Image (cartoon, rainbow, N blue to C red):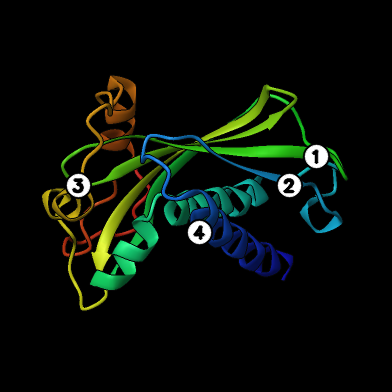
Amino acid sequence: MNVWWRTILTLLRARMLLRRKGRMPMTSVGRIRLRTLPTDIDLLRHMNNGRYASLFDLGRFDLLVRTGLWDAMNARGWYAVVAAETVSFRKSLELWQRFTVETRLLGHDDKAVYQVHRAVVDGEVYAEMIVRARFLRRGGGVLPMQELFAAVGRPDDLPPLPAWVSAWAEGSALPSTKAPAPSVWTW
């Protein structure tokens, strides 16, 4: 339940910053400050690995609101879903530890947008997640990237997607929802 409260607070804060400071460029690094709570901790007394994804969602919401993309998506009946993610851990976040979630647009391909999320303590990366997100229409169907960027603009200074991210996306992809995907173990 605490992630719901954190989500509401994050959205309210992002809206306030959007009104006060205006829209951030899409290539900006969004930052939100958090603290590891007792509900984030696992049996090993550090942040549960699954909780990182939920807290990184907060960084994504913050960036979407502050860049104006959230309102543009809602006005058109679009929404984003996570299609794939990978996370790497360096150090553990302990109970009550303060940290910053940093979020930035990494790039896109012809089907998805990629973001980087980091858990940072005193300028040091503790964990990093790459997220591949697809955009869908509330009425059904996938939103083509050309239509997304035609509506919200494509940042001119967006670098090309790193080759390893493209390879990861291709290698981790599951079959289309229209294709069969039986659970068959081959080893």
Please identify, in this view, whether the residue under mark 4 or under mark 1 is nearer the observer: 4
Task: Name the residue located 80 percent from the left edge and 49 percent from the top edge.
Answer: 42
> Could you tell which of marks 3 and 1 lies nearer the N-terminus?
1
Tell me, yes or no, whether the two marked residues, 3 and 2, touch with CB atoms within 8 Å.
no
Check disc 1 and give the amino acid type: Arg
List the residue tagged with mark 3. Answer: 111
Percent position of residue 160, x then y: 24, 24
Task: Identify the image quadrant of residue 110.
Answer: top left
73 or 179, nearer to the observer: 73
How crowded pointer 2 is (Cα within 10 Å; few <14, some 14-19, many 20+) is rated as some
Q: CA distance from mark 3 to mark 2?
A: 32 Å
Q: SS class of the residue under badge 3? A: loop
Of circles 3 and 2, which is in front? Answer: 2
Q: Dot 1, how many residues are within 10 Å of its Cα: few (below 14), some (14-19), or many (20+)?
A: some
Q: Amino acid at mark 2?
A: Leu
Q: Alpha-carbon neighbours of circle 3 within 10 Å: few (<14), some, or many (≥20)?
A: some
- Circle 1: element type: strand
Task: Please report contact status of discs 3 and 4: CB closer than 8 Å, yes or no.
Answer: no
| Residue 34, disc | 2
Image disc number at residue 98:
1
Which callout, 4 or 2, points at the residue further toward the start of the chain? 4
The residue indicated by pointer 4 is 19
Q: Which label belongs to residue 2?
A: none
CA gap, disc 3 to disc 1?
36 Å
| For the residues bearing labels 1 and 2, Cβ distance under 8 angstroms | yes
Amino acid type indicated by mark 4: Arg
Q: Earlier in the sequence, mark 3 or mark 4?
A: 4
- The answer to which of marks 1 and 2 sits earlier in the sequence is 2
Which residue is located at x 68 percent, y 62 percent?
6
Residue 2: horizontal and vertical position, in percent?
Answer: 74, 66
Quadrant holding the C terminus: top left
**Residues at marks 1 and 2, CA–CA distance in whole angstroms:** 6 Å
